[in-house]
Amino acid sequence: MKEKIIEVSIDLFGHNGFTETSIQDIVEELGVTKGTFYYYFKSKEELLMEIHLRYIDELLQNQDEVFIKNTKSEQKLYDIVYMIMKHIEGHGQSARVFFREMQHLNEEHLKDIFKKRDLFRQNLNKVIQEGIDTGEFRQDLNVEIVALAILGAVNWSYHWFDPKGKLDEKAVSTIYIDFMLNGLKAT
């Protein structure tokens, strides 16, 4: 039942927003009582935190897997971008809830999420720095700005990416990486 509560809540929060969705809305959608909700969660915010933790923990785990299987920085970068796009494709509403509803978490919960989010970004920084050190990437790059630009572009795609559209997540990832590595300039 806990999984069903989470699944329904992600859908409701994604469509209606966190503040516009009540616990009553959640239990009515499931056909259960509020007691059932409170058996698993103390509050709606605790539920939101669970959704956030699951989202970022899965990304961190997938990022670790990318690092294990690749040695080249360019391939790691591509695989991270593709992994995020694939994650958005498979968890679209979770991504929407993660990015849009984070503001509704209290300071203590935000610290936990920010710590994990920052770890993900720091790991990306390492990939870029590694690419610079090995000569795969330009020497004059500002690692932190490049990482933030990549994450900004890829994370924002939850707004517009349609997995049933003309381009799938692999094609979009390839376009992103080509743009990030080669830019717009004709050579």
Image (spheres, grey):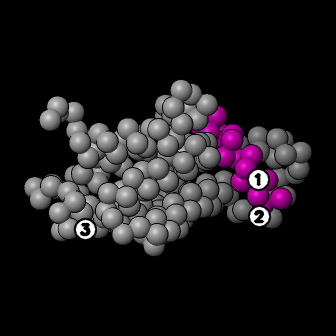
Residue at 71 percent of width and 54 percent of height: 6
Question: Residue farthest to the top?
Answer: 166
Instruction: Return the residue at label 3.
Output: 130
Tag count? 3
Mark 1 belongs to which amino acid? Ile
Is residue 102 visible in this depiction of the protein?
no
Q: Amino acid at mark 2?
A: Tyr
Q: Which residue is mark 1?
A: 5
Under tag 1, what secondary structure?
A: helix
- Read off the magenta span: 1-21
**Circle 2 residue:** 40
Task: Give the quarter of the image for residue 18.
Answer: top right
**Residue 185 marker:** none
Labelled pair 2, 1 in contact (Cβ < 8 Å)? yes
Q: Is residue 18 above or below residue 148?
A: above
Give the structural element (helix, strand or loop) at label 3. Answer: helix
Q: CA distance from mark 3 to mark 1?
A: 42 Å
